[in-house]
Amino acid sequence: MTLDLFGSVQRKVPEHEDLLPGVVVLRRRALADDAALVAASHSVTSISPFRHMVTPGGFTMSVAMSNCGEWGWVTDRTGYRYDRLDPQTGKPWPPMPAIFETLATEAAAEAGFANFTPDACLINRYEPGARMSLHQDRNERDFSQPIVSVSLGLPAVFQFGGDQRADKTVRVPLAHGDVIVWGGPARLRFHGILPLKRGDHPLLGAQRINLTFRRAG
Ligand code: MD6
Ligand code: FE
């Protein structure tokens, strides 16, 4: 704890938290580049727009999604998978912006995963009430590769479970600019996002954008 020039109390936010084995939170790591990241995200979604995909069970997701990079994560009635083409445009996903790839590679290295080169970036858009129910990320080929996840806009509560759906969960608040890197023993843990609370973020208004970087192919 330190006192600043005006005598108010500032709690130091730890920059590098080891949340659970294999999970590192880099608080505010993306903050300095926030406007450029939002602009890059807009350039992607102007080509491959946000859309609400349908799960194999027939439910329309409350989170709207797009992708960039060589592979994009998609779901429809036939299942979850990575695809080189955007099913909505019939064209390849937009290339991954350099500022995305640089952030993902640097954050992974800071968390202990050297040489992470993502070939897929899923862009999730949450509006108030949107949520992501508990799931595992298991459509990727190589589980030794980490996942880097960047939060922008309204804050959200991330739920971390165990390797079984019924395992008890811990809640982790994620704010604008926070980056999570996870892999190793945490790679297949169940996780989700609680329903987004209403709010108005200076840069993004009433939404949260999440960028999730993976090595899919
Ligand atoms: C989200 N994230 O933060 C949803 N999955 O909006 C995920 O589902 C996720 O953040 C794997 C690794 C990191 C993540
Ligand atoms: Fe996930």
Image (tube, rainbow, N blue to C red):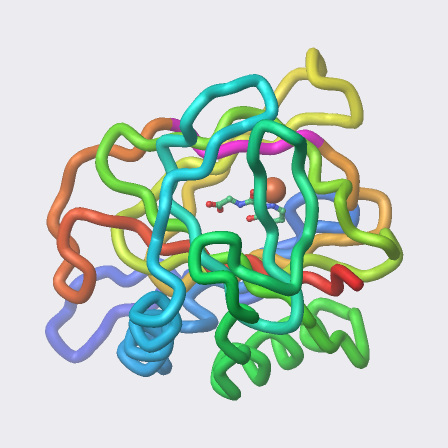
Q: Quadrant of residue 162?
A: top right
Q: Quadrant of the N terminus?
A: bottom left
Residue 10, located in which quarter of the rendered image?
bottom left
Relative to 194, say whether 208 is above or below.
below
Residue at the location (70% across, 41% down)? 137
Decide if residue 178 is on the left or right side of residue 105. left
Q: Left or right: 190 with respect to 30?
A: right
Which residue is at the far top? 166
- Is 138 left, or right, of 37 in this rendering? right
- Which quarter of the rendered picture does the C terminus lie within? bottom right
Q: Position of residue 25 (x, y in %)?
A: 57, 57
Q: Which residues are magenta?
A: 190-194
Q: Which residue is at a point 54% across and 64% down the rendered structure image?
A: 26
Above or below, 98 against 50 in this view is below
Q: Nearer the viewer, residue 162 or 10?
A: 162
Residue 177 visible, this angle? yes
Residue 32's spot in the image, x, y percent?
A: 35, 81
Q: From where the camera sits, is residue 31 visible?
A: no
Q: Where 46 sits versus 206, above or below?
A: below
Q: Position of residue 57 (x, y in %)?
A: 57, 18
Q: Is residue 88 magenta?
A: no
- Magenta: predominant secondary structure element? strand
Where on the image, by quarter, is ligand 2? top right
Q: Position of residue 115 (x, y in %)?
A: 80, 80
Left or right, residue 205 beside residue 18: left
Residue shown at 65% from the left, 64% from the top? 84
- In the rendered view, tell whether residue 121 sits above or below residue 200: below
Q: Nearer the viewer, residue 132 or 113?
A: 132
Number of marks: 0
Q: Quadrant of residue 136?
A: top right
Residue lying furthest front? 90
